[in-house]
Image (cartoon, rainbow, N blue to C red):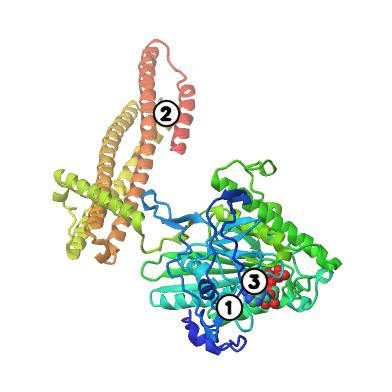
């Protein structure tokens, strides 16, 4: 990301915003001094609280002295400009208190109320309707009473002063991961656009915020990476449009109302940002000029039109969204925030033009919805009983696109500053009182903005870090305990004892390999040809038994039986031997595995793994073990076939017994009657044995 330029340097490069001489500082630019009417000292003032409810206030109203008025107004008296008194002691965000929730593992948050400032538009003529007190917190009218706010600006102060007191603290919060919202509210022609967008001769709050953001980004650029994205939209006749959409730009320039062909966008819930405008363009901007050009582009297609109060009235609510993502390089901790800067359309009485009337009704409807939401939030925050008309806990954010869009901010997760612009004229007193009542309610709305922070990949902070350390200590202790146990059991005295020395380990593994190879060889020897030959001999003996003609030579028959008996015994002995050998190999396998896992435990504990050899030995050992397992499986198959043979032998033994018995009885019969039919018995027995062999 290219480093941000300093505001001063860039300002001098901005061709589109020529400044009046002396307009670059808050002290330099001023407007004609307002003439504030002094009220009679004895008048009874009315104080406004939530909901604009009047409460008698017996405080004696202040009567500003002439000098005070001059100082406040930055007045040009006798040709000398009196600087506007800086109010360093005035902390505009004082109501917002940082709350550290680290003990509860939740992100830090700011609690407080919406910050509300009143900005009267300079009056052509003498102000006899409203009084602003010395402390710049109260605006009063004999009939309407007192209204108290965070700031009540003198009409003559410049945008920079307004910015410093009502917006600047929010920018710092945004760079620290808190969402920020600033919106200008007031009747048509009262100075919302003047304040937010400025003029060719004076920077507006938006531009000042943009410079501040990039200035802060530059200050942090050695330690942090930043990404700044911007979106710009308008809500026109209850429809959301993208002001950065070039298509819209070309099709709409200089057109209004029914000629609108822009694509309407929808607002959806969003887990990260609360709500999201689907399809809204986000433009990455890397310099303040980039961002200002983007905004200016959007402004060219924003709807404006002439009203009875304003020749170039904003006919839509314009919302600029600046997303600020910050990543601290050292920790990878990411903070992200959205700064929403809203220039709302002005409320107005019915106008003569039909098109303006239609727009006006939409504007009034959405402002009414905003007023209702603010009222309900205000009562909710105060925990007080709502009037019958508002009697429900439901906050109707969905009643208008404006409230829906501002829902995340109004529902608390944002640091919010409202700038209410008013007319001081006696002809607009009803609208001004309405605006002040709205402002009073907004002042009561509580906020609980959370810091948007994501822990870095390679680090953790605060309580997460402590938790991780505790977990690692626990794991380490467990590993140590296991190692101690293994030592006590003499495991480290075995040939497989792990060594921290790599060459020792390799030698050890080679030795194990040799042993295993020998065992493998031995196993092969046991299972190879002689055994199969003896099995073949055995089969031959059985075959001859099957085909034996019991009428043949009795000696031969008995030899055959003896041979089978011997083979049977030999097979049984071999099977036992094989079984014990398989058990032995299984034991070996187990112990090899155990030694391997032991090595792993030890390696982790001593952090040897990083420096271990290329692992060939491990691989070959594993291969051998795999081979052994296969051999064992084969042996098991052999054993099971031998079991079948044993079964067959047992059957053959029984046959032999039968034959022997028959032989005996035949001898007896021969002695008694000559001839006999033994073959008939042997046939089925032979086929049974044949079947058994073919199965095994
Ligand atoms: N504080 C101020 N100082 C000097 N001129 C101002 C001030 N506020 C407003 N004006 C002038 O008043 C006129 C109307 O102001 P602006 O367009 O800002 O009103 P608005 O509240 O945005 O109106 P709308 O709601 O109709 O858009 C403009 O010509 C503007 O220059």
- Label 2–label 1 contact, CB within 8 A: no
State the image coordinates of residue 385 (x, y, percent, origin top left): 60, 41
Other-residue count near label 1 (Cα within 10 Å), few / some / many at <14 / 14–19 / ≥20: many
- View quadrant of ligand 1: bottom right
Q: Residue at x 49, y 62 (%)?
A: 178
Above or below residue 473? Residue 135 is below
Is residue 473 or residue 135 the one in the foreground? 135
* Secondary element at tag 2: loop
In the rendered image, which quarter is residue 489 located in? top left
Above or below residue 493? Residue 38 is below
The residue beneath circle 3 is 121
State the image coordinates of residue 225 (x, y, percent, origin top left): 44, 73
* Secondary element at tag 3: loop
In the rendered image, which quarter is residue 462 located in? bottom left
State the image coordinates of residue 694 (x, y, percent, origin top left): 46, 38
- On the question of residue 241 being in view, the answer is no
Q: Residue at x 37, y 45 (%)?
A: 633
Is residue 644 or residue 324 the one in the foreground? 324
* Secondary element at tag 1: helix
Q: Quadrant of the C terminus?
A: top left
Q: Nearer the viewer, mark 2 or mark 3?
A: 3
Position of 317 with respect to 462 (left or right) is right
Give me the C-alpha separation between circle 3 and circle 1.
28 Å
State the image coordinates of residue 451 (x, y, percent, origin top left): 46, 59
Q: Which mark is residue 617?
A: none
The residue beneath circle 1 is 291
Other-residue count near label 2 (Cα within 10 Å), few / some / many at <14 / 14–19 / ≥20: some
Circle count: 3
Q: Is mark 3 within 8 Å of ligand 1?
A: yes
Position of 566 with respect to 275 (left or right) is left
Pointer 3 or 1: first along the chain: 3
Q: Which mark is residue 549?
A: 2
């Amino acid at each position: 990301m290219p480093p941000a330029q300093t505001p001063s340097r860039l300002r001098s490069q901005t061709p589109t915003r020529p400044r009046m001489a002396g307009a670059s500082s808050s002290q330099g630019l001023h407007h004609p001094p307002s003439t504030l009417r002094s009220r009679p000292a004895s008048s009874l003032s009315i104080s406004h609280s939530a909901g604009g409810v009047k409460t008698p206030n017996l405080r004696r109203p202040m009567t500003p002295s002439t000098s005070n008025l001059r100082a406040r107004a930055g007045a040009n008296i006798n040709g000398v400009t009196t600087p506007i008194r800086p109010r360093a002691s005035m902390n505009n965000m004082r109501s917002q208190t940082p709350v550290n929730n680290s003990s509860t593992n939740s992100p830090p948050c700011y609690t407080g109320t919406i910050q509300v400032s009143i900005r009267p538009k300079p009056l052509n003529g003498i102000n006899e309707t409203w009084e602003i007190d010395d402390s710049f917190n109260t605006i009063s009218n004999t009939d309407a009473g007192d209204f108290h706010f965070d700031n009540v600006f003198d009409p003559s102060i410049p945008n920079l002063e307004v910015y410093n007191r009502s917006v600047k603290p929010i920018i710092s919060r945004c760079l620290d991961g808190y969402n920020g919202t600033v919106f200008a509210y007031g009747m048509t022609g009262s100075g919302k656009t003047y304040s937010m967008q400025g003029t060719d001769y004076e920077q507006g709050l938006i531009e000042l915020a943009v410079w501040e953001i990039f200035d802060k980004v530059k200050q942090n650029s050695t330690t942090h990476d930043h990404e700044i994205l911007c979106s710009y939209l308008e809500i026109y006749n209850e429809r959301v449009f993208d002001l950065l959409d070039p298509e819209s730009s070309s099709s709409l320039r200089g057109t209004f109302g029914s000629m609108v062909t822009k694509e309407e966008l929808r607002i959806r819930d969003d887990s990260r940002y609360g709500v999201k405008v689907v399809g809204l363009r986000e433009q990455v901007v890397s310099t303040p000029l980039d961002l200002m050009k983007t905004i200016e582009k959007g402004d060219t297609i924003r709807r404006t039109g002439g009203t009875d109060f304003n020749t170039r009235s904003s006919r839509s609510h314009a919302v600029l969204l600046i997303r600020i993502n910050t990543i601290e390089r050292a920790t990878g901790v990411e903070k992200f925030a959205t700064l929403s800067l809203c220039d709302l359309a002005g409320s107005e009485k019915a106008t003569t033009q039909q098109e303006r009337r239609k727009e006006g009704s939409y504007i009034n409807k959405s402002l009414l919805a905003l007023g209702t939401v603010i009222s309900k939030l205000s009562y909710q925050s105060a925990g007080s009983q709502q009037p019958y008309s508002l009697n429900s806990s439901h906050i109707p954010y969905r009643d208008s696109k404006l409230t829906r869009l501002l829902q995340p901010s109004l529902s608390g997760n944002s640091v919010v500053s409202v700038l209410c612009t008013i007319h001081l004229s006696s002809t607009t007193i009803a609208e001004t009182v309405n605006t002040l009542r709205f402002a009073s309610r907004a002042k009561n709305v509580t906020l609980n903005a959370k810091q948007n922070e994501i822990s870095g990949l390679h680090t953790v902070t605060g309580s997460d870090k402590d938790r991780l350390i505790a977990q690692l200590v626990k794991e380490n202790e467990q590993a140590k305990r296991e190692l101690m146990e293994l030592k006590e059991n003499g495991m480290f005295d075995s040939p497989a004892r792990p060594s921290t020395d790599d060459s020792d380990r390799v030698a050890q593994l080679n030795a194990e390999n040799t042993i295993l190879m020998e065992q493998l060889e031995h196993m092969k020897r046991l299972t190879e040809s002689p055994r199969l030959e003896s099995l073949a001999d055995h089969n031959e003996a059985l075959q001859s038994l099957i085909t034996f003609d019991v009428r043949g030579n009795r000696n031969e028959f008995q030899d055959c039986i003896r041979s089978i008996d011997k083979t049977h015994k030999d097979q049984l002995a071999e099977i036992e031997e094989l079984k014990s050998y398989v058990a032995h190999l299984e034991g070996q396998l187990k112990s090899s595995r155990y030694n391997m896992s032991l090595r792993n435990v030890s390696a982790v504990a001593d952090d040897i793994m990083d420096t271990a050899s290329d692992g060939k030995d491990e691989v070959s050992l594993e291969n051998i073990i795999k081979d052994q397992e296969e051999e064992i499986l084969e042996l098991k198959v052999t054993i099971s076939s031998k079991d079948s043979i044993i079964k067959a032998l047992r059957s053959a033994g029984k046959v032999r017994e039968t034959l022997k018995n028959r032989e005996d009885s035949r001898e007896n019969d021969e002695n008694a009657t000559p001839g006999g039919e033994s073959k008939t018995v042997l046939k089925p027995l032979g086929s049974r044995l044949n079947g058994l062999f073919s199965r095994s």
